[in-house]
Image: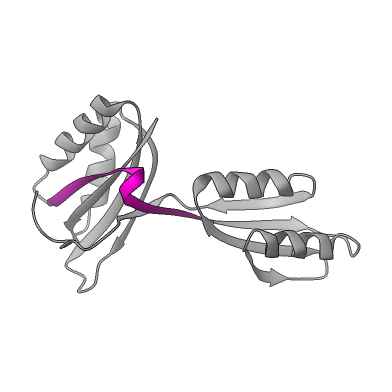
Amino acid sequence: MNHNIGVIMDNKPGVLSRISVLLARRNFNIESITAGPMPGDETTRMTVVIQGDEYVAKQAEEEMLKLEDVIKIEHLKPSETTRREIVLIKIQVHKEQRSEIVDLAKIMDCKIVDISHTTLMIEHSDLPEKIDLLIDLLSGYEILDVARGGAIALKNGIEEPSASN
């Protein structure tokens, strides 16, 4: 089972690296890590997806809280969270396939972000399961390349992001 963990940390060089090394050293199975600065550039929000049971997720949270640059940790439960991933998919297209792929992109609520005589590039942001479905539906065409970002997640509702845990 995957667990989404939200981390708010100081926006300093090396903090992301220290967290990923800490988790790897402790043998946690990391599905993905994404991070980006929050408004004001003093803090960074990171989403870590850990594979394992509740105990494993709790242990990962406790380990990260030991780092002095970590301000807050929260377990992002699926029922209380909005989670998304992003993907870019570059597809080889023949003239007769172009409209099929464009129609599929529309049905899946994707954007065509690049087009040439022989390729289409699709961008999609959604739940990981929907991205898996899109890739599966496109597997009948010649996929040239895929770039998939890790999960990002925020707790639903109103909450102060910088309050300490």
User: Which residue is at the front of the view, 14 or 40?
Assistant: 40
Q: Residue at x 26, y 58 (%)?
A: 45
Residue that lies at the very extreme toward the bottom in this rendered image: 40
Rendered view: 20 above or below 96: above
Query: Magenta part of the protein: which range?
Result: 70-86
Where's residue 130, x and y in %? 57, 49
In terms of depth relative to the viewer, which is nearer, 111 or 67? 111
Left or right of residue 21: residue 92: right
The image shows residue 19 at horizontal and vertical percentages of 23, 43
Q: Residue at x 54, y 44 (%)?
A: 129
The answer to whether 162 appears left or right of 20 in the picture is left
Residue drawn where x is 91% and y is 62% of the image: 96
Q: Is residue 118 above or below residue 47?
A: below
Q: Nearer the viewer, residue 105 or 36?
A: 105
Q: Is residue 99 magenta?
A: no
Say whether residue 75 is magenta: yes
**Which of the 4 image quadrants contains residue 103?**
bottom right
Q: How many numbered callouts?
A: 0
Query: What's the image's color scheme?
Result: one colour
Q: Specify the principal SS of the magenta part.
A: strand
- For the N terminus, which image quadrant? top left
Q: Is residue 132 left or right of residue 8?
A: right
Quadrant housing residue 99: bottom right
* Rendered location of residue 143, percent (x, y): 73, 50
Residue at 23% over, 36% down = 22
The extreme right residue here reads 96
**Residue 131 % position (x, y):** 57, 49
